């Protein structure tokens, strides 16, 4: 964690949303949002998952019920509270997924749980570079005024243009967006430490300019426990237009059916 302290300790359900299905919960899926994203953006995934899968979604500082907290400065500020606030029993059979910057947060959450002797069953990285690589698509939010930053966000997609075009709403979300992109710009894990003790699946879009499909295979280097790669049509938020295909891949991972040799790559 960083050397600064938050204004207060948030409640666990502020940090991790818990959206269980019906009946006994077989598996837990933890989702970590993209830069500038929030838990609400992924709550709709509940209806696409099997009823016996418990859905958890991380909520970062500076948004939702955590709006009054200090903005994050490092990936540790994003990953640490999530790992600490996971509900009881949720790590018994856990799959951790992140999208874009959220994949780096997911990677760090897995490492934290691993260090605590609670290694998740699988890690899913979506539309993101491998954690030991420098960011190939830096935003430099510190150099951009609000209009320029909004334009950069719109190119990537994933944020409702109605929010970005409304002056009052934009004023609320811009600080957390700036904070997240500043973190994503500089994050890079030491290659010697960039390892997880679970299988890894990476998914991306074939026309993604932020995380090019050709680079996704580098995630295989963080694990010796099985690797699979899936490339779907689309850009950085490819899954928005390919929900059936995306959830077919994700359901295979959650169901334990997506384990491939570490050198393998699977295209969809």
Image: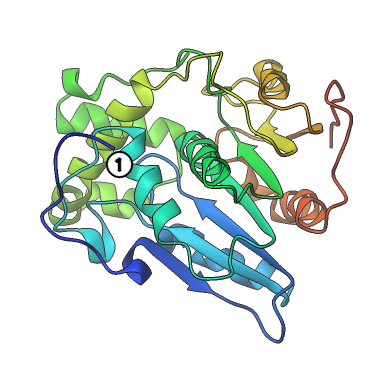
| Residue found farthest to the front | 117
In the image, is residue 190 above or below residue 84? above
182 lies above or below 41 = above
Residue closer to the observer: 183 or 118: 118
Residue occupying the point 30% across, 32% down: 74
Q: Determine whether, in the image, residue 51 is placed left or right of residue 83.
A: right
Query: In the depicted view, which residue is nearer to us: 266 or 104?
Result: 104
186 sits to left or right of 223: left
Q: Is 101 situated above or below 91?
A: above
Q: Quadrant of the N terminus?
A: top left
User: Is disc 1 placed on a helix, strand or loop?
Assistant: helix
- Which corner quadrant of the image does residue 197 belong to? top right
Residue under the image location 53 percent in, 17 percent down: 132
Residue 227 picture location, percent across and down? 79, 31
Quadrant hosting residue 101: top left
The answer to whether residue 233 shows anywhere in this view is: no
Q: Can you give x and y, in whole percent of width and height, for residue 37 in the image?
A: 38, 48
Q: Nearer the viewer, residue 166 or 105?
A: 105
**Where's residue 102, x and y in %?**
48, 41
Q: Residue furthest bottom?
A: 23
Identify which residue is drawn at 69% across, 76% down: 25
The residue under label 1 is 77
Residue 36 in the image: above or below residue 146: below
For image coordinates 60% across by 49% down, the residue present is: 96
Res. 39 image quadrant: bottom left
Mark 1: give few (<14), some (14-19) or many (20+) Cα within 10 Å.
Answer: many
């Amino acid at each position: 964690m960083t050397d600064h302290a938050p204004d207060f300790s948030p409640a666990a359900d502020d940090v991790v949303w818990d959206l269980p299905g019906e009946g006994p919960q077989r598996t837990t899926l933890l989702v970590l949002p993209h830069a500038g994203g929030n838990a609400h953006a992924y709550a709709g995934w509940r209806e696409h998952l099997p009823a016996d899968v418990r859905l958890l979604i991380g909520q970062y500082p500076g948004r939702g019920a955590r709006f009054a907290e200090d903005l994050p400065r490092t990936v540790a500020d994003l990953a640490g509270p999530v790992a600490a606030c996971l509900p009881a029993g949720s790590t018994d059979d856990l799959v951790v997924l992140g999208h874009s910057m959220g994949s780096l947060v997911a990677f760090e959450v897995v490492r934290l749980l691993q260090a605590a002797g609670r290694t998740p069953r699988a890690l899913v990285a979506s539309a993101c570079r491998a954690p030991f690589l420098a960011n190939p698509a830096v935003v430099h939010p510190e150099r951009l005024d609000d209009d320029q930053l909004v334009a950069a966000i719109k190119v990537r997609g994933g944020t409702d243009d109605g929010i970005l075009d409304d002056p009052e709403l934009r004023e609320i979300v811009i600080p957390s967006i700036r904070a997240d992109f500043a973190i994503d710009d500089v994050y890079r894990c030491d290659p010697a430490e960039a390892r997880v003790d679970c299988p890894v699946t990476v998914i991306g879009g074939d026309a993604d300019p932020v995380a090019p499909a050709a680079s996704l295979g580098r995630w295989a280097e963080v694990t010796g426990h099985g690797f699979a790669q899936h490339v779907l049509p689309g850009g950085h938020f490819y899954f928005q237009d390919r929900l059936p295909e995306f959830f077919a891949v994700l359901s295979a991972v959650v169901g334990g059916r997506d384990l491939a040799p570490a050198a393998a790559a699977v295209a969809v």
